[in-house]
Image (tube, rainbow, N blue to C red):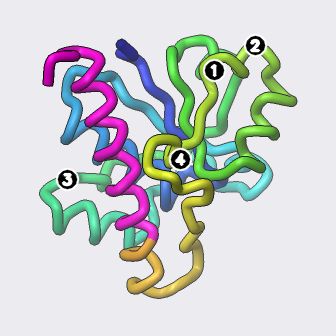
Amino acid sequence: MYKRILIVCTGNICRSPLAEVLFQSHMPWCQVSSAGIAVDNCHLSGSPAAPYSQQIARAIGCDLSKHSAKQLTPALVNAHQLILVMDTNQLEHIAHHYPNSRPKLLLLGQWSNISHIDDPIGQNLTKFEHTFNQITTAVLAWKQVFNHQHNPNQ
């Protein structure tokens, strides 16, 4: 079973922070982190989670107030057993830049037939809620997979 999971999106301020806190709340036995593939390019390093992401997290009893965006690095890739991304473009980008990541690189929506988790950056609360619903569906599918691996008789 995976114990160290890294969730990656573009800027590490909208999607991956929400997925991180959802994973932590549903699977507390996992050590979950998040990062972005373009944090440095977008000058987001150290930025807080997007206000709507923080609002949604608060509504489900999670806290993103201390979140600080960070760039995906070789050290992060090497430190995690599973790396989950939002779409196939990110998967290919990471596989290209970090070839050793390929065996542990999957879509967040792998088990929920969601091949693309929408990026709500710069959009309204409704769009963030839609993205959050996609992330929730994906995380709950991972939880089911993990529970089955841990207890196959379920």
Three-letter amino acid code of the residue under disc 2: Asn
Q: Residue at x 72, y 21 (%)?
A: 102
- Tell me whether the residue at label 2 lies in contact with that at label 1, contact meaning CB atoms closer than 8 angstroms: yes
Which residue matches tag 2? 100
Residue identifier under label 3: 62
Q: CA distance from mark 3 to mark 2?
A: 33 Å
Earlier residue among tags 4 and 1: 4
The residues bearing labels 2 and 1 have C-alpha atoms spaced at a distance of 8 Å
**What residue does disc 4 label?**
69
Instruction: Specify whether 34 is left or right of 60.
Output: right
* Secondary structure mostly seen in the magenta stretch: helix
* Of labels 4 and 1, the one closer to you: 1
Residue where numbered disc 1 is placed: 77
Q: Earlier in the sequence, mark 3 or mark 2?
A: 3
Residue depicted at x 14% and y 25% = 154
The answer to whether mark 4 and mark 2 are in CB contact below 8 A is: no
Mark number for residue 146? none
Magenta residues, start to end: 131-154
Which is more N-terminal, label 3 or label 1?
3
